[in-house]
Amino acid sequence: DQYIAIVLPGRMFKGAFQKRGLAPVVLSRSLGAGDGDFRALRRLHLLAQRHRALAFVLRPARHAQAPSPAVLRLLLASALHPLQGAEVERLAAGCRPDIDWQAYLALVERHHLVPTVYRNLSTHAAVLAPQPVLAGLKERAEQNRRRILQLLVELGQISRWFEQHGILVCTLKGPLLSQRLFGDASLRFSTDLDLLIHIETLDQAEALLLEHGCQRVTPAVPLTPRQRQAFQQEWYNNT
C-alpha cells in the first residue's frame, strides 16, 4: 500500500511537474514528506508558481500565530538545494535583522529541513544569520548525520542477511534517495528504513530479523496464524 501510494501519485503528477519546469527531486521529496497526501501536492503546486525547486511540502504549522511573510520567504529561500545565482542573493536578502528567528526555526524543525537549511546558511549567509541560530542548527544537523550513518550501517547489515538467504529487497526513500539526489545521504531527514520485499518472503524475513535481535513493534503482541494473515492483508508491511 505504501509503495502504491508513492508510485501512483508520482505518475499522475509527473507531467504537471515537468510542465512547470520543476526538477524530479521536487516531486519525489513532496511524495516522501507528504506520505502520498494529494492535498500536500496541491499546496506544492501553488507554491511552485513562484519557486523553481522546493525541497519540501508545507504542512499546517503548529503555531498560535501564523508566521510572517518575511519568515516564509526566508524559509523558502533556505530550503532550496543546491542554491544557484539569484537564489543565493534571495537567501542573503531574507536574513533581515527583524526576522523572527524563533518562528523560522520552528518551521525548519516542523518540515524536517534542518540539514538543508544549515548547509545553505553556513555556506552562503554565515555572517548574516545569528551565531546562536547557526550553532543550534549545526548541532541538530550533526545529530541527523550520526543517525543517518547508523541507518546506513543497519541497512548494510540487513541487506547482507537477506542476500545470504536469497531474500530480494528494495530500499525506498531514506538515506539512499538523498545520496542519489543530493550527493549527500545526510542532507535529507530520516529516522527509519523503508524496505520493500515480496509478500511470500515476509515470514522468512521477519524470522531472520528477529534472529538477529530486531523487535517487531507493530503489533507488539504475538499473533495467531489467522490474526497474522489478517494483519498482513490489512497493512502489507511490518515495522
Image (spheres, rainbow, N blue to C red):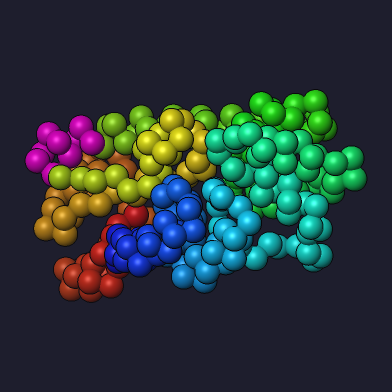
* Image quadrant occupied by the C terminus: bottom left
Residue at 47% in and 68% down = 37
Provide residue 144's location: percent of width, then percent of height.
54, 35
Q: How many marks?
A: 0
Near-viewer residue (117 or 238) = 117
Near-viewer residue (52 or 66) = 52
Residue at 62% in and 44% down = 79
**Above-or-below relation of 86 to 228:** above
Magenta span: chief secondary structure: helix
Provide residue 113's location: percent of width, then percent of height.
60, 45
Near-viewer residue (184 or 62) = 184
Identify the residue at the far right of this view: 98
Q: Is residue 129 left or right of residue 49?
A: right
**Above-or-below relation of 28 to 146:** below
> Does the stretch in magenta take in 161?
yes
Provide residue 74's location: percent of width, then percent of height.
73, 46
Quadrant in the rendering for residue 159: top left
Q: Is residue 196 left or right of residue 142?
A: left
Provide residue 10's location: percent of width, then percent of height.
36, 61
Identify the residue at the far left of this view: 166
Near-viewer residue (202 or 107) = 107
**Above-or-below relation of 40 to 119:** below
Residue at 32% in and 63% down = 11
Residue at 55% in and 62% down = 44
> Does the stretch in magenta take in 61?
no
Please report the bounds of the magenta region as a residue range.
159-167
Q: Is residue 61 left or right of residue 217?
A: right
* Image quadrant occupied by the N terminus: bottom left
Quadrant in the rendering for residue 18: bottom left
